[in-house]
C-alpha cells in the first residue's frame, strides 16, 4: 500500500510542480518540523518526534544533505530536551532535599520540647492486685511496652499483663504515651487499666 502512495504522488501532480516549488515545499516541511520541536520544548513535553506518514514520505524525497541536516537538528533538539528534563529533575530533587532538611531542623527542636513527664493513673481490673501509688509521672517518649514492663516489675509477676486505655481498647506495644495522652487524657491524666487476663475484646 505504501508503494501505491508513493506511486500516486509521483503522478501528474508531482511532475507538474517545478523544482523551485518542490524545494519550497520541502523547506516548508522542514520549518514545520522545527516548529513542532520548539513547541514541544516550550510545552515541557519530551517525546520522540512523531512525523505523519505523508510527511515522512515527503521527507524521504529530500536530497541527502538536507535529510542529514534535518536528522542532525532533530538529534540536537532531543539532546536539549533531555538536558532540560534532567536539569528539571535535579532541581526538583534539590528542592525536595532542601525541604527535607528544613523539616528535619524544625522537627528536632519540637522533639526536644516534647520530652516531658505525663501523669498516668493506673486502675486494676477485676481481681488484679493494686499498685501503690496509683498515679505516676512517666516520660512522654515512653511506649506501652515500657509501661507493661513497669507494671510487671511493680506487681512482681512473671505472667503477662494486659493493658487497656480507658477500659476500652488495648494499644499496640510500640504506641507512644504522648500520642495516647493527647487523644485520651481525662483531667490531665492518662488512665491505663491493667489486668492479668484478657478483659475486653
Image (spheres, rainbow, N blue to C red):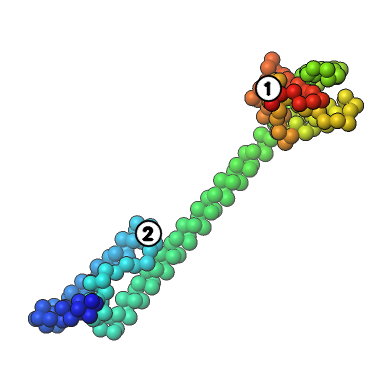
Residue at figure coordinates x 50%, y 53% from the top left: 92
Is residue 121 visible in this depiction of the protein?
Answer: yes
Q: Name the secondary structure under disc 1.
A: loop
Circle 2 packing at 10 Å, graded few (<14), some (14-19), many (20+), is few
Depicted 180 relative to depicted 53: above or below:
above
Furthest toward the right, the residue is 156
Residue 45 marker: 2
Whole-percent x, y for residue 8 in the image:
15, 78
Residue 168 marker: 1
Depicted 195 relative to depicted 47: above or below:
above
Furthest toward the bottom, the residue is 64
Q: Quadrant of residue 9?
A: bottom left
Residue 107 marker: none
Residue at figure coordinates x 26%, y 79% from the top left: 60
Quick one: 87 or 136, which is closer to the camera? 136
Taking 64 as reference, is 88 left or right? Answer: right
Residue at figure coordinates x 74%, y 34% from the top left: 173
C-alpha distance separating marks 1 and 2: 56 Å
Depicted 9 relative to depicted 174: above or below:
below
Whole-percent x, y for residue 104 in the image:
63, 43
Of the residues under marks 1 and 2, which one precedes in the sequence? 2
> Looking at the figure, which quarter contains the C terminus?
top right
Depth-wise, is mark 1 or mark 2 nearer the camera? 1
Whole-percent x, y for residue 39 in the image:
31, 61
Amino acid at each position: 500500500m505504501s508503494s501505491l502512495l508513493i506511486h500516486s504522488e509521483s503522478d501528474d501532480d508531482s511532475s507538474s510542480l517545478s523544482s523551485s516549488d518542490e524545494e519550497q515545499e520541502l523547506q516548508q516541511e522542514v520549518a514545520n518540523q522545527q516548529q513542532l520541536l520548539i513547541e514541544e520544548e516550550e510545552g515541557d513535553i519530551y517525546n520522540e518526534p512523531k512525523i505523519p506518514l505523508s510527511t515522512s514520505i515527503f521527507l524521504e524525497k529530500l536530497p541527502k544533505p538536507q535529510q542529514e541536516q534535518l536528522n542532525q537538528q532533530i538529534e540536537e533538539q532531543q539532546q536539549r530536551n533531555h538536558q532540560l528534563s534532567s536539569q528539571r529533575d535535579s532541581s526538583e530533587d534539590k528542592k525536595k532535599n532542601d525541604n527535607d532538611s528544613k523539616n528535619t531542623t524544625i522537627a528536632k527542636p519540637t522533639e526536644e520540647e516534647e520530652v516531658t513527664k505525663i501523669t498516668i493513673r493506673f486502675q486494676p481490673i477485676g481481681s488484679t492486685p493494686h499498685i501503690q501509688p496509683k498515679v505516676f509521672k512517666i516520660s512522654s517518649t515512653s511506649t506501652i511496652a515500657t509501661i507493661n514492663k513497669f507494671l510487671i516489675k511493680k506487681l512482681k509477676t512473671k505472667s503477662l499483663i494486659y493493658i487497656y486505655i480507658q477500659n476500652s481498647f488495648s494499644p499496640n506495644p510500640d504506641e507512644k504515651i504522648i500520642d495516647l495522652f493527647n487523644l485520651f487524657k481525662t483531667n490531665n491524666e492518662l488512665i491505663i487499666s491493667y489486668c492479668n487476663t484478657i478483659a475486653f475484646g
